[in-house]
Amino acid sequence: MSEENLTQEPRGHSVVYSFFNRWEAPLKSGKVHVFFRKRFPSKLPDRVYFYIGAPVMAVVGSAKVTKIERVSASQALTLAARGCIPEVELAKYLAGRDSVGAIYMESFEFFNHPVSADDISSRMVFSPPQNFQNLSAQDEQMLVEMGR
C-alpha cells in the first residue's frame, strides 16, 4: 500500500470503527486525537464513526479524519498520550508488530440519540465491525439522521 494513497483526495466515504465501551468517555471528552489500528482503509475517509460495544452497542458520533499514516511501533508509543492510552496498553496491543496505523481526528460531533446496532441493521447491512466498515454516502446520511 502506498503511503500517498492514505492522504490524497477525493474523499467521499466514511468508516465505522468499533471501540470497547471504556473508550466512550475519552472520545466524548475530546481527549482522543489519534487511535491505532492494525487494519485501516487504504483511502483517507472523510469521517470515522464510533461504534461503542457492549453494553452500549450503538454508534454515538463521529470525527473528521485528518490523516492516516503507518507509524513504527516506537513512534506509536510516542503518540500514546495523544490517543489517551497508556504506553503499556498500546505496547500490549502492538504485540511485537513493527508498525501500526495511526488515525488522526478532529471536529468531533456526537449524536443526540445514539443509534443502536439493531436500528442500523434494520435499515442497512451492518454488523459491528471487527476492523472497520465502509459507509456509502447514503448510509452515512441515514445514520446521521437517525442520530439527531
Image: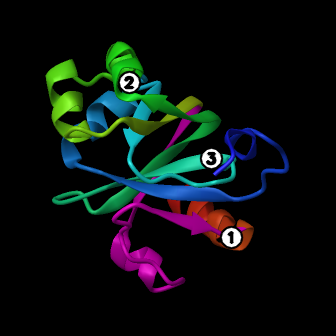
| Residue at screen point 41% across, 34% down | 35
- Disc 2 residue type? Ala
Q: Which stretch did the figure color magenta? A: 107-136
Marks 2, 1: nearer the viewer: 2
Judging depth in this view, the residue of 3 and 102 nearest the camera is 3
Q: Badges 2 and 1: C-beta atoms under 8 Å apart?
A: no
Query: Is residue 26 positioned above or below 65 on the image?
Result: above
Marks 2, 3: nearer the viewer: 2
Q: Residues within 10 Å of mark 2 (few under 14, many from 20)?
A: many
Q: Badges 2 and 3: C-beta atoms under 8 Å apart?
A: no
Label 1: which residue? 136
Label 2: which residue? 76
Label 3: which residue? 47
- Disc 3 residue type? Arg
**101 left or right of 128 in image:** right
2 or 1: tag closer to the N-terminus: 2
Q: CA distance from mark 2 to mark 1?
A: 30 Å
Q: Position of residue 79 (x, y in %)?
A: 39, 17
Q: Quadrant of residue 27?
A: top left
2 or 3: tag closer to the N-terminus: 3
Query: Is residue 136 positioned above or below 26 on the image?
Result: below
> Does the image show residue 121?
yes
**7 left or right of 18 in image:** right
